[in-house]
Image: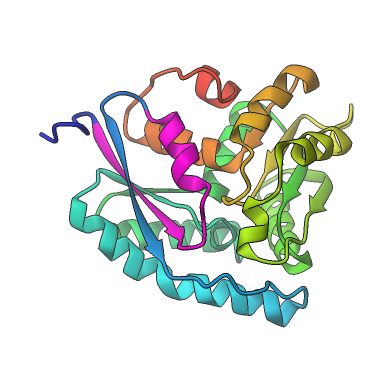
Amino acid sequence: MDALGYRKKIGIVVPSTNTVVGPECEALRPRGVTNHVARLTLENKPIEASEAGFLAHMQRMRDGIFPAIDQVMTCAPDHVIMSVAIEAFTGGVAAAAALQDELAKRAGVGVSMGSTAATAALNAFGAKRIAVLTPHQPKGDEIVAGYLKEAGFEVVRLVGLRCASPFAIAEVQPPALRKLLREIDGDDIDAILQVGTNLANAAVAAEAERWLAKPVLAMNVVTYWDALRRCGIDDRLFGFGRVLEEL
């Protein structure tokens, strides 16, 4: 039995430019659970607004996912979180399910990823009409919206920040996030979903639930919740939103 991860060890795969997943997941970690991060190499190159440019950015991430899975499995985690968010939405519901299965077979353990975790959380809250916040360029927004619509949700509003580089995503500050969440809210939606694992929104989303009076789901929180529950850890964790407190 691992001296620190005596309940579970969770592996986390992230792009090497991602500076948010690690700290946010560490803040969510219950006693007896340890997090172990593997990084797929991604340079901080500009993310082009064109479809071809964005797809090239995605391909650079895709190429590193399986080697990073192999790397993190050398520490024998009990479960893996795939924190390359846009890949989890690409191709729609069937493609996401196939990717999750393929990753699980490669790892030999269960895998959580943003698309299926978000779907599970939204369904658990009974949300059907949603607003979505992403850091993506238009092609990324199209991919996310397409998945969510196929999964049975009505995307009433979607705002993409069109962040110019991976670092630029992590540089979006809490005041800007608060403003954006207020702007995309409305009486015509049941919940807000934030996509993009390098957007530091965990604390802001939990705060926003108090003044918007509805679920505000931050990608890293939702994916970590999914991992804990799949591992059989049902601890109710407070301070990071209703998904960890109620579900």
Residue 37 in view in this figure = yes
Q: Residue at x 82, y 40 (%)?
A: 180
Report if residue 217 lies within the magenta region.
no
Q: Classify the position of the N terminus by image quarter.
A: top left
Residue 106 in view in this figure = no
Q: Quadrant of residue 57?
A: bottom right
Image position of 74 (left or right of 105): left
Q: Residue at x 79, y 36 (%)?
A: 181
Nearer to us in this view, 245 or 147:
245
Q: Residue at x 49, y 46 (%)?
A: 21
Residue 199 x %, y %: 63, 48
Q: Residue at x 77, y 61 (%)?
A: 162
Nearer to us in this view, 208 or 78:
208
Q: How is the image coloured?
A: rainbow
How many numbered markers are drawn?
Answer: 0
Q: Quadrant of residue 58?
A: bottom right
Report if residue 26 lies within the magenta region.
yes
Image position of 156 (left or right of 221): right
Residue 244 x %, y %: 51, 24
Q: Height in image: 209 above or below 196?
A: above
Q: Height in image: 5 above or below 75?
A: above
Q: Quadrant of residue 47?
A: bottom right
Residue 217 x %, y %: 64, 34
Image: magenta residue range: 8-29
Q: Residue furthest left?
A: 1
Residue 189 x %, y %: 82, 32
